[in-house]
Image (cartoon, helix red, strand yellow):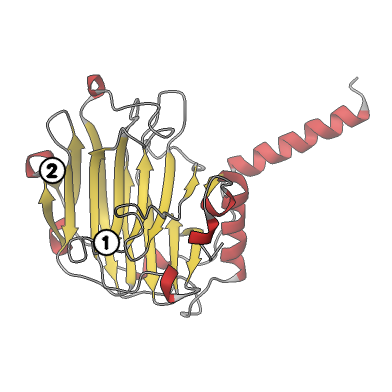
Amino acid sequence: MAPPFLSLILLFLIKIASSSAQGPPSPGYYPSSRIRSMGFDQGYRNLWGPQHQNEDQGGLSIWLDRSSGSGFKSVRQYSSGYFGAAIKVQSGYTAGVITSFYLSNGEEHPSDHDEIDIEFLGTTLDKPYVLQTNVWTKGSGDGNKLIGREHRFHLWFNPTHDFHNYAIVYNPSEIIFLVDDVPIRRYPRKTDATFPLRPMWVYGSIWDASSWATEDGKYKADYNYQPFIGRYKDFKLGPGSAASPSGTTGLSRQQYAAMDWVQSNYKVYDYCTDSKRDHSQTPEC
């Protein structure tokens, strides 16, 4: 018979594994259900790589091979709202490849743009995908002003097995990133200098970012595994600029509990705790 303290440790480990296997606590509120789904051509158009893009029953597949990637863009700009899509990413070796869904005004403000990112950072065969969320403000990221505000996560499911819903809620007070309606990050407006305030378009793309995407560029895109395909459906573009059931800014207590669970169990990088960063450039930390 194992000593009592070993039995207690074993029970503790089993409890942790069981908790993780169950997924996050219920957020209690599902903002995606309040925004109707639309087909790709109801709100978006091809931006580049049309030969690497295929529409099917309102959904969209885009792919990267040696010759090109592909991207799309919303028809109109938005100052606030709920922006989401169900996405399924490529399985297998995808190092160096980024599949993204994001807001930006880079075409209108090329030298000082704003951007809000959801990015799947490709991976090697033995490691899980990294989901990166990021906020660029007034050109941070252009030229020599590389001031990203990255949080990176593993997920409590395999994003290559099925479609899952990914969304950005954006309003003048906050940015909230959601996965299957579970808030994974809230970025509040603390000062005008650290928050994007100008209208943006919504984009999606797949492209080769071998220089940095996978373990800071350690692993590159390998086109022996091409094509790399990103699949999107159930697009949502709506005026619902609040993520909480109260219809105001912030989150409910239940939503915060779900977000805390994700961040405690699956967050793998936070720019505010990176000792290599110059935090004078990120005063919100």
Name the kind of residue labelled 1 in the image: Ser
Residue 267 x %, y %: 55, 47
Name the kind of residue labelled 2 in the image: Gln
Question: Would you identify the image quadrant in which residue 44 lies?
Answer: bottom left
Q: Would you say 67 lies left or right of 168 here?
A: left
Which residue corresponds to the image point at 32% horizontal and 42% vertical from the top-left?
88
Q: Give the structural element (helix, strand or loop) at label 2.
A: strand
Q: Would you say 18 lies left or right of 31 here?
A: right
Residue 76 x %, y %: 17, 69
Residue 104 x %, y %: 27, 61
Residue 48 x %, y %: 11, 48
Q: Which residue is mark 1?
A: 104
Identify whether 42 is placed above or below 197.
above
Q: How many marks?
A: 2
The answer to which of 200 and 190 lies nearer the viewer is: 190
Q: Residues within 10 Å of mark 2 (few under 14, many from 20)?
A: many
Question: Would you identify the image quadrant in which residue 240 lies?
Answer: bottom left
Which residue corresponds to the image point at 82% horizontal and 33% vertical from the top-left?
9
Q: Which residue is mark 2?
A: 53
Q: Earlier in the sequence, mark 2 or mark 1?
A: 2
**CA–CA distance in space, label 2 to label 1:** 21 Å
Q: Which mark is residue 66?
A: none
Q: Residues within 10 Å of mark 1 (few under 14, many from 20)?
A: many
Identify whether 129 is placed above or below 152.
above
